[in-house]
Image (cartoon, rainbow, N blue to C red):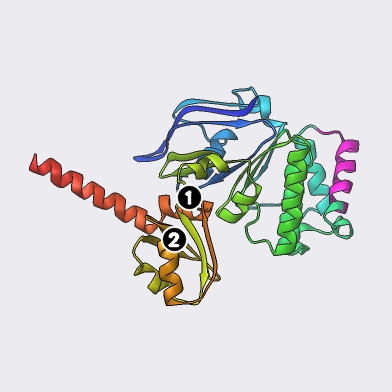
Amino acid sequence: MSVVNITNVNKTYGKHLAVSNLSLEVPQGSLYGFIGPNGSGKTTTIRMILRIIHPDSGSIHVLGADSAAAANDQLGYLPEERGLYKKLTVRRMLLYYAALKGMSPAEASSEAKRWLTHFELTNWANKKIETLSKGMSQKVQFIASIIARPKLLILDEPFSGLDPVNTEAIRSTILKLREAGTTVIFSTHDMEVAEKMCDFVFMIYKGNKVLDGTLASVKSQYGADSIHLRWDGSSEQLHQIQGVQRVVDMGRYQELQVAGDPQEILRTLVSRGSVQHFEITQPSLHDIFIRIAGPEASMDAQSSKNQNAEFGAAS
């Protein structure tokens, strides 16, 4: 069963096509990652799901409904641009958000107490929002998005600006909510987080869907053409080895995109330095992202466009 169904959706802003002919299904109980560069259409898609904005054409059904009001009380939303009522106390603000979702005062009070305890914020319950640290404020806003026990939780960059401790607290809570049956959509620029957490990954680039599926199915499209390498040579030397098409330097190791015989590449590496790790594998989600949206991809696309233009002129 799908919690979100998007069918042939288009959205423009003036002459800019923000989302083009998008179709997408989010299965119930899944953790669905939305990835893509800035300005690719992620947030526009999320806002259309939430009915903050409306598509120019196509249809969107959320929790079986095609109107915002029908599904609103069953949705939780954490926007990328955080915003809290700074003059309210933490407890009062959480009770206010819960009331907006139709919770009774008794239910809201119980849930607020539970989550404040869970995130170690009990001592701050009667403090004004303006007195909280940034990390505390973000945890409070996260609680506000889940206090009404939503069936669908949408998180736009939930880990942005968080330190490792607070990131882990929210990450573990997201996974527990998913285990309890909540469907979670979250957008992120962190490919490692998406790769470790998500059941499904959707990538949008320049308004077009370019990836959609399980991580295994996404990676299978690229085959085992990657090598994870750790050695004492330089990245510049790697570019000079025959069969190495591209190098992504991750600091402590390099990820190579290769063509040809990996064993021949290994022999060349051993002859030029000390190899501590050599693994033939599928590309990481980070590498796939770079292949699609990185500078080299843009240059390849422009080169192809120029060649097509030259061909058309010659014809």
Q: Nearer the viewer, mark 1 or mark 2?
A: 2
Foreground residue, 196 or 217? 217
- Which of the 4 quarters of the picture holds residue 290? bottom left
Compared across the picture, whether 189 is left or right of 314 comes to right
Disc 2 marks which amino acid?
A: Gln
Q: In which quarter of the image is the C terminus?
A: top left
Instruction: Decide: is 75 above or below 249.
Output: above
| Mark 1, secondary structure of its residue | loop
Q: Can I make out residue 26 in this image?
A: yes
Compared across the picture, whether 165 is left or right of 82 comes to right
Region rendered in magenta: 103-117
Q: Give how far across and how far down residue 93 sits, in percent.
A: 79, 48
Look at the image and say whether residue 193 sits in the magenta stretch.
no
Disc 1 marks which amino acid?
A: Ala
Q: Mark 2 points at which residue?
A: 263
Q: Give how far across and how far down residue 195 sits, in percent.
A: 60, 50
- Which secondary structure class fits the magenta region best? helix
How much space separates mark 1 and mark 2, taking CA atoms?
Answer: 14 Å
Instruction: Name the residue at 48% across, 59% down.
Output: 227
Q: Residue furthest left?
A: 314
Residue 67, labelled with which disc? none
Q: Name the residue under label 1.
A: 224
> Dot 1 surroundings within 10 Å: few (below 14), some, or many (20 or more)?
some
Q: Can I make out residue 86 in this image?
A: no
Instruction: Decide: is 124 above or below 39.
Output: below
Compared across the picture, whether 199 is left or right of 22 comes to right
